[in-house]
């Protein structure tokens, strides 16, 4: 997989755009650095805990991923937003394999 990276400047924050296999990805970590340069991972973690975020990601997967496991997704989506709920990008990837 050949990767190309370019950077754009948005409101004084440098954001990475990564192109791989004809798809383009935006760095969430770079965007989160705008809010908290010291701990951008915390911003991403909190965003992933949000029920609205998970509903958006679930809808996108449902529309674009024929192998999406909707039943498994619904199980943890119901817990989103609760104090004990923790979700990471790594967990999302593993649950949708």
Image (cartoon, rainbow, N blue to C red):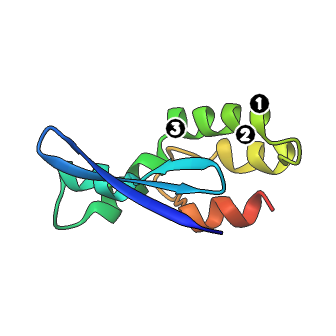
* Quadrant hosting residue 78: top right
Q: Are marks 3 and 2 in contact (CB under 8 Å)?
A: no
Q: From this view, report whether residue 94 is shown above or below residue 80.
A: below
Q: Which residue is mark 1?
A: 63
* Residue 63 position within the rendered picture, expressed as x and y whole percent measured from the top left: 77, 30
- Residue 6: horizontal and vertical position, in percent? 36, 55
Of residues 15 and 67, the one drawn nearer to the viewer in this rendering: 15
* Left or right: 8 as drawn, with respect to 22: left
Q: Is residue 47 left or right of residue 68?
A: left
The residue at which mark 2 appears reads as 61
Q: Quadrant of residue 59?
A: top right
Which secondary structure lies at badge 3?
Answer: helix
Viewer-side label of 3, 1: 1
Element assignment for label 2: helix
Residue lying at 72% horizontally and 67% vertically, measured from the top left: 94
Residue 15 point in image, percent of width and height: 29, 51
- The residue identified by callout 3 is 53
Query: How many residues crowd mark 1 within 10 Å: few (<14), some (14–19), many (20+)?
Result: few
């Amino acid at each position: 997989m050949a990767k190309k990276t370019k950077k754009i400047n948005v409101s004084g924050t440098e954001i990475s755009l990564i192109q791989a296999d004809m798809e383009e990805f935006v760095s969430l970590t770079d965007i989160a650095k705008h809010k908290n340069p010291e701990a951008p991972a915390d911003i991403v973690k909190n965003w992933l805990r949000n029920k609205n975020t998970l509903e958006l990601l679930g809808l996108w997967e449902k529309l674009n991923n024929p192998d999406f496991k909707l039943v498994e997704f619904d199980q943890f989506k119901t817990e989103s937003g609760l104090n004990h709920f923790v979700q990471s990008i790594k967990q999302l990837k593993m649950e949708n394999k």
